[in-house]
Amino acid sequence: MHVPVFIDIGLDEQAEELRAYFKGLGAEISEEKSSQGLEDDLHKIIGVCDTCFKDATDAEVEGVLNGILSMLALVEGDKKEGLILSFCEKLSQATNNQVGLVCLKVLWALFMSLEENNPLRFQVYYYLVGVAGKTQQLTTVYKDIPSTKSMFVSNPPSNEQMQKLYRRLHELLLSNGKSEEAGRVMIELLGTYTTENASQAREEAQRCIIASLADPNTFLLDHLLQLKPVKFLEGELIHDLLTIFVSQKLEAYTRFYESHKEFVNGLGLKHPDNIRKMKLLTFMQMAENRSEITFQEVQQSLQLNEEEVEEFLIDVIKTRLVRAKISQGEGVVYVSSTMHRTFGLGDWQQLHTLLSAWKENLNTVKEQLAHVASTQVELMHKKI
């Protein structure tokens, strides 16, 4: 560990001052030095360090916690790991937001003090994320999944450790109002499971599906079907519902809801919101291979009243899922492009063909430009 020593005295003297300080605050700790050594003394100090969270000023709390941190930096031996984790556990229990911010600073200093190949670094980061989430400061310690993984390249965590972190991040991102990033974390979590252990993520797969269906800004869902824990749900109503949102039309959802109202409502999904999303998805599917769609077709396919058609089309264009122009006079919507609801093997093959043709065309243009350039050079030489 590389942290500054905040109290320029020996470890025994630091421990003595801290014991007296916490004793003065009413903590159950002896002022006498432990007969079992400094590690035991520090263990007892850490055990009561949260006493100062109640009445001390933020500056006092920070000074005391930094004092303990400086002692941890100087302690050697097998008990050091346990002391650090106990310290992290205490800091994570801060309930006051201001004290939580102080604990966040101290935890960050502890995290940065550990060598990159130290396995404790990941465990400290786990506590750091928890405190940052509780104090609404998650963005200070978490940017995205690739950035987080890059911090542990020297000593990668186990699959189980990453699953634990993803669960914590998902929960905190949701509570911090970042549902989109929470969804990405959940998908990353489900991607850590194999066919053999997919059943262990059954509840998480269900939560992922429900959150994706409920999110008003999430429309492309086919990637969820490839996740092992989601595949494990095949044959169940939740999987059937997801399949409808992935590739089927409004009528299919309407039939499903009529047969399973209690199930859909029991998931916490709102039927009017589901209807809105399915109408948008149905129109996307209609527009995939069409350049013109009449208002009448839209009205019939999406079960709209005549006066609702134009407002619906405006809503579609706002989502940016479809690029189109509305001709009210003609009663037609002109489609220039649309996102595909699903992207299967055939779509990849078509994309490969298009890119290959584009590459060949570029090569042809390049050769033609080179020919034109060489011709111009020859003409210039002849004039000279």
Image (spheres, grey):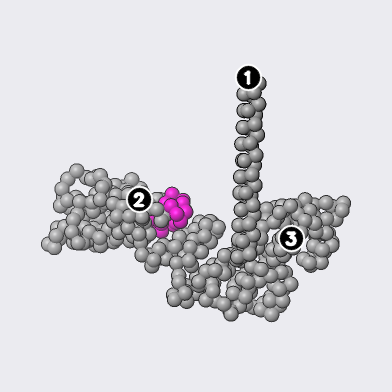
Q: Is residue 176 above or below residue 263?
A: above
Name the residue carrying label 3: 289
User: Does 266 sit above or below residue 352?
Assistant: below
Instruction: Determine which of the numbered discs, if any, sits on residue 139 in the image.
Output: none
Identify residue type, mark 3: Asn
- Spot occupied by residue 311 in the image (x, y as percentages of width and height): 77, 56
First in sequence: mark 1 vs mark 2? 2
Mark 2 surroundings within 10 Å by alpha-carbon count, few (fewer than 14), some (14 through 19), many (20 or more): some
Question: Label 2 sits on what residue type?
Answer: Trp
The residue that label 1 is drawn on is: 384
Residue in front for this viewpoint, 323 or 58: 323
Q: Are marks 2 and 3 in contact (CB under 8 Å)?
A: no
Task: Identify the residue at image location x=71%, y=54%.
Answer: 337
Q: Nearer the viewer, residue 235 or 372?
A: 372
Q: Residue at x 61, y 78 (%)?
A: 237
At mark 1, the secondary structure is loop
Mark closest to the chain's N terminus, 2 or 3: 2
The kind of secondary structure element at disc 2 is helix
Q: CA distance from mark 2 to mark 3?
A: 53 Å
* Residue displayed at 19% across by 61% down: 78
The image position of residue 229, as x and y in percent, is 50, 72
- Asked if one can make out residue 228 in the rendered structure from this viewpoint, the answer is yes
* Foreground pick, 158 / 275: 158
Where is residue 183? Give x, y as percent: 53, 61
- Quote the CA–CA distance across marks 1 and 3: 57 Å
Please name the residue shown 12% across and 62% down the image.
35
For residue 108, which numbered disc appears in the image?
A: 2
